[in-house]
Amino acid sequence: KLLQDQDGPTTNATTATSTSTPATTCGCSISWISPKVFQIHDPALLETTVLPRYFGHSIQFASFRRQLTAYGFQSLGQKKYTHQDFSRDDPQGCERVVRVYKKKTKPKNNTAKVAKPN
């Protein structure tokens, strides 16, 4: 289960089912805590079970966090994240979640004075 609602419903951004077990007691690694906010409960479990399933290879939690940032997710602290286009109630909104590229800045001119040989 990619995301499980604390009150029950789960989603992988395209389907939704329901269960009566709260995420905090079912051993889930990630869950919705509101329609626009999800929380990661167990990073180690997420790393070993969920991320390889959806990314096709082993990925560390720190790398996953960097990816969230690269795609415009905002951290709300305590492993909670939100994105304006990522919602439990709007699976099609995932199509609007795109990687955010920062403008490249010019490197600083670091030319040091070099003494000329005589």
Image (cartoon, rainbow, N blue to C red):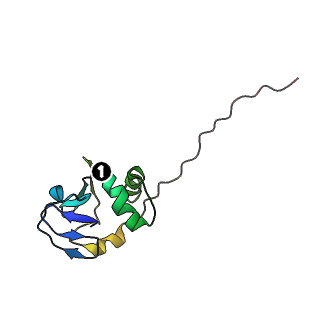
Q: Which residue is mark 1?
A: 75
Front in this rendered view, residue 115 or 87: 87
Q: Position of residue 106 (x, y in %)?
A: 58, 47
Residue drawn at the location 36% of the way across and 66% of the way down: 97
- Residue under the point 29% across and 50% down: 75
Sort mark 1 into few (<14), some (14-19) or many (20+) by Cα contacts within 10 Å: some
Give the residue drawn at x 43%, y 62%: 99
Say if 7 sits above or below 74 in the image.
below
Q: Quadrant of residue 13?
A: bottom left
Which part of the image, by quadrant, shows the C terminus? Answer: top right
Q: Please provide percent x and percent y for residue 53.
A: 38, 67
Q: Secondary structure at mark 1?
A: strand
**Callout 1, which amino acid?**
Ser
- In the rendered image, residue 95, in percent from the top left (x then y), is placed at 35, 72
- Is 107 above or below relative to 113? below
Residue sitting at 85 percent across and 25 percent down?
Answer: 117
**Residue 96 position in % (x across, y down):** 35, 70
Nearer the observer, 87 or 5? 5
Q: Which residue is farthest right?
A: 118
Q: How many marks?
A: 1
| Quadrant housing the N terminus | bottom left
